[in-house]
Amino acid sequence: MIIRFHFIEKIPRVFRNKYVLTIIIFLIWILLFDSNNLISRYKDMMALHNLKIDREYYIKRIESDRQKLHELKTDNHNLEKFAREQYRMKKPDEDLYIILTPQEDRQITRRNN
């Protein structure tokens, strides 16, 4: 008595070939289950893209900081101006009034929370 599986006959002949079946299984394994699958490759590519954007930002920031440092080292007037603006320093006989834009106020509020 031979038992026949009728669902196998419904599969096209091309997919019953052991070589085609092996290639399909291999592709599924590579695309989904391997350590270098498409999902992890996509995540790695997005992380690399974000790191490149961050790198450009920090390169520009370093350059602007170098320029500010050079200005501070070369002129005492710039040093005093920087101290007054950034650290809100004042002379003993002066009054200091700080006026913030709404955007600056939000940034300070976020930093303190």
Image: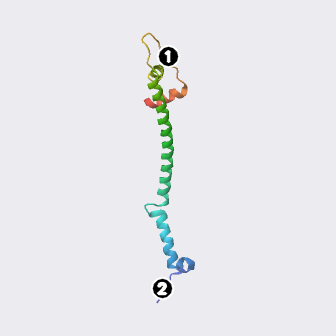
Location of residue 33 in the rendering, given as x and y in whole percent from the top left corner: 45, 63
At horizontal 50% and vertical 51% (from top left) the residue drawn is 46
Q: Nearer the viewer, residue 43 or 60?
A: 60
Residue flagged by tag 1: what amino acid is it?
Tyr
- Local packing at callout 2 (Cα closer than 10 Å; few below 14, some 14-19, many 20+) is few
Q: Quadrant of the C terminus?
A: top left
Location of residue 41 in the rendering, given as x and y in whole percent from the top left corner: 48, 57
At horizontal 47% and vertical 57% (from top left) the residue drawn is 40
- Residue hosting label 1: 97
Question: Please, which residue is most extreme toward the top here?
Answer: 93
Q: CA distance from mark 2 to mark 1?
A: 94 Å
Residue flagged by tag 2: what amino acid is it?
Ile
Q: Nearer the viewer, residue 44 or 29?
A: 44
- Residue hosting label 2: 3
Instruction: Please say whether residue 10 is visible from this viewpoint.
Output: no
Location of residue 81 in the rendering, given as x and y in whole percent from the top left corner: 48, 20
Question: Please, which residue is most extreme toward the bottom here?
Answer: 1
Label 2 secondary element: loop
Query: Would you say the residues marked 2 and 1 are in contact, meaning their CB atoms lie under 8 Å apart?
Result: no
- Local packing at callout 1 (Cα closer than 10 Å; few below 14, some 14-19, many 20+) is few
Label 1 secondary element: loop
Q: Nearer the viewer, residue 71 or 92?
A: 71
Q: Earlier in the sequence, mark 2 or mark 1?
A: 2
At horizontal 49% and vertical 67% (from top left) the residue drawn is 28
Compared to residue 22, the image places residue 55 above or below, namely: above
